[in-house]
Image (cartoon, coloured by chain):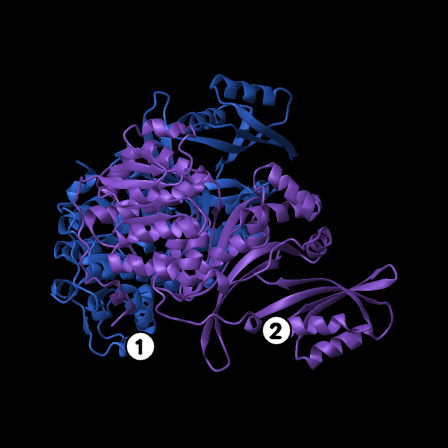
Chain colours: A blue, B purple
Amino acid sequence: MTALSAEGRNGNYPGKGIGQPVGVAVLGMGTVGTEVLRLINEFSGSLENRIGGPIDVRGVAVSDLSKKREVLEKFPDITLTDNARELIDRDDIDVVVEVIGGIDYPRELVLAALNAGKSVVTANKALIAAHADELSDAANAAGVDLYYEAAVAAAIPVVGMLRRSLAGDQVQRISGIVNGTTNFVLDAMASTGASYEEALAEATRLGYAEADPTADVEGHDAASKAAIMASMGFHSRVTYDDVHAEGITNITADDIAAAAEAGFTIKLLAICERLIDDVGNTSVSARVHPTLVPNDHPLATVDKSYNAVFVEAEAAGRLMFYGNGAGGAPTASAVLGDLVGAARNKILGGRAPAENPYAHYPVADFGDVPTRYHIDMSVVDRAGVLAEISRRFAAQDISISAVRQEESGEHSRLIVVTHQSLERKLAAIVDELRDIDEVKSINSVIRLGA
Amino acid sequence: MTALSAEGRNGNYPGKGIGQPVGVAVLGMGTVGTEVLRLINEFSGSLENRIGGPIDVRGVAVSDLSKKREVLEKFPDITLTDNARELIDRDDIDVVVEVIGGIDYPRELVLAALNAGKSVVTANKALIAAHADELSDAANAAGVDLYYEAAVAAAIPVVGMLRRSLAGDQVQRISGIVNGTTNFVLDAMASTGASYEEALAEATRLGYAEADPTADVEGHDAASKAAIMASMGFHSRVTYDDVHAEGITNITADDIAAAAEAGFTIKLLAICERLIDDVGNTSVSARVHPTLVPNDHPLATVDKSYNAVFVEAEAAGRLMFYGNGAGGAPTASAVLGDLVGAARNKILGGRAPAENPYAHYPVADFGDVPTRYHIDMSVVDRAGVLAEISRRFAAQDISISAVRQEESGEHSRLIVVTHQSLERKLAAIVDELRDIDEVKSINSVIRLGA
């Protein structure tokens, strides 16, 4: 018996037949929903050829019925409603596109749609990262599709690549820049010398950061994407709560300058890893934190609000995917690609590969994750300090990769870069250093390695 | 009626059911076939979970039965035969993996397999680029899958991205480095100053070039890939014969040095474009030629034998994919991803999106393709030469973007970079320049623009 038998079907997902229209409901008409409708209208002929029958948008749910929405002029016969539930329950809706955002309300709607036998396409990373288990179970029980390519890095086909292209391989590691706002801010700091606050203000002014940028700058958005990538890549359940997330709010212009001097660029990375411990047990890790990326690594050169994802697989080796990770049109492109897949299955029968956490690897405690630290501290300027600090690292069995010492006023600035060790041991040595007389202050601690 | 109705089915592709084994025949045991078998054995548990039933390799066809093949020890019950046809005809074979290479013989085998209702996975770019129409028709008539991700850039999921991820978008342009051998040679020339012959010898020594490198260095291999990418990206039929292909055999160390001085890197690009003429008619172009790529373009930094493909789509914007474009393991990874897809459809029912040339755009004549020329010539060293040459360009309505003139012995070296014009007009002006007294020699003509 395989994990797929949980699908409750036995190889029989018949379609409605070539030429039949596919009834679609779109929930939400923000930037993405509007763009989805615009593209469905613009590409209607090619979509029909690719699907085997026409896309028939039969209803759109919005929260504010009074708002003027130009694109709807192209869809004169649709139902415009503020009652999404009613739309979902209609018999002539085959596929539901959810682009509302949030968690609780869309969860209720997506579950209702799946339970009613409708396939669902969603761009909602927070929803999938929190409730993939429940939603997958519902899709499997109903024998319908649940697609969410747009939830990770918009038009960059990260989900499809993990779901299909690497289906015959074993993914070892995924690391990527999956949040455009923070990449814009860090890139602006690096290229102009601006402070975090200045760069964020510029990002807000240009529309790259939302009015409340918390979800982006604190790493929450990237954490959702890390959970989804780890779940798909390692065939194990990793949720948002399993992801250790640190944002970029503590990164200073000094940190960026020091990194540049040492040949690194600071990027907010989502890192998903398969770990094997000393006795051969496998676990998985998903984390988000600012990271010193060597300048010759392809991720270091990803500028502006672009996203890029690196994947290492046993047979495929290293792959990188690069593109627009956000924005109305790129997100809508991913939604439409999924819609074609879901609609095609409604016509021709069959199901897309469902998320399948058959491997059931546990999520490693963050303290057990191997990493490297770049520690920037101010130390008293006298002989023997480096010897004392080195002795402390050695006593904790942490190997030092490089040390740089600079005069800086009355104190010396000392930068220590470690070799790989466990997160908990590295965090402990930093705590220890804070307490010794020779160290006046720990200026920054940033992890290293893409 | 849509193009899919040619499939001859009406939305009913039932599967054999969860838990049933999928019988597989592997044709060919070269580097790729051997690696495919190794990975099927290594990943058997995870493959079963992803597919819904076990992969059962029931037969392997080879040309030389006497050769010792270690990996077969892992498959004690299989049929090893030199009669591929017999294997294909067996009732217990559901999916045929073709990794023989060549065109006529695999064509016969793949057709026989499709006609017998077996799905086919192939890594054979030459076969697909020459016979996609015939093979697609056979797959459609039988209602089975024909997959060939490994035919373009090995583990980089270019085919899947065009087939599925961008299914809701409109691809405008694809440009890529899709031949590892030529990229290795050009990169070696650029980084060491070596001549073409020296760099090719080094590539051969290191195993990046075959004993007979013709198909690679003359651009034939890249042309097959261009035909496949253009067909999938533009939903039109583009075959190998439709692709204008120029190789790298005329590129000199001087060309590379001059390019570097002007801020360019010479790459062998496969370029697929959607063109719209003055009266609004659409055509498509697929071509392969050495190209001056600006150093700040991501394709310029693709080194060694790596491949990378750039895609521009209307909604998605610019996407790039990078990775190993050749080699046993990366190619086998792509074959296995396809095998999982084909096997899954055999178990659960349904079909993968078939290639669908519904748009029927004609292939543009190469002379009608817009491009830019970088012309390096030796001219007599006297006043008025530049004026005369400029006049000739203006008379042909070709606009000049930049001119660089250098003393070089008794003659001047003159480099002219044009703005975009039609290939036929640019080729004509070069012919004209060859015949005028002021031009002593045309040293090189290289197209520009990634």
Q: What residue does disc 1 label?
A: A70
| Left or right: A182 in relation to A215 | right
Q: Is residue A323 above or below residue B428?
A: above
Q: Position of residue A405 (x, y in %)?
A: 63, 30
Q: In what element is the residue under mark 2?
A: helix
Q: For residue B57, which numbered disc appears in the image?
A: none
Where does residue A420 sit, x and y in percent of width and height?
48, 28
Task: From the viewer's side, name the closer residue of B379 and A446.
Answer: B379
Cα–Cα span, label 1 and label 2: 45 Å
Q: From the viewer's perspective, tell me whether residue B4 is left or right of residue A430.
A: left
Q: Quadrant of residue B387?
A: bottom right
Q: Name the element at disc 1.
A: helix
Query: Are the numbered discs 1 and 2 placed on the same chain, yes or no?
Result: no
Q: Residue at x 61, y 59 (%)?
A: B291
Q: Is residue B294 above or below residue B43?
A: below
Q: Nearer the viewer, residue B372 or B248?
A: B248
The answer to whether residue A18 is seen in the rendering is: yes
Front-lying residue, B137 or B159: B137
The x, y position of residue B183, in whole percent, is 58, 48
Image side of residue B73 versus residue A444, left or right: left
Amino acid, disc 1:
Glu
Residue A156 appears in the figure: no
- Label 1 marks a residue whose chain is A
Tell me the residue at 24%/57% (across/down): B143
Q: Is residue A282 left or right of residue A190?
A: left
* Quadrant where the image shows the N terminus of chain A: top left
Q: Label 2 sits on what residue type? A: Arg
Q: Which mark is residue B424?
A: 2
Label 2 CA crowd tier, 10 Å (few <14, some 14–19, many 20+): some
Q: Chain of mark 2?
A: B
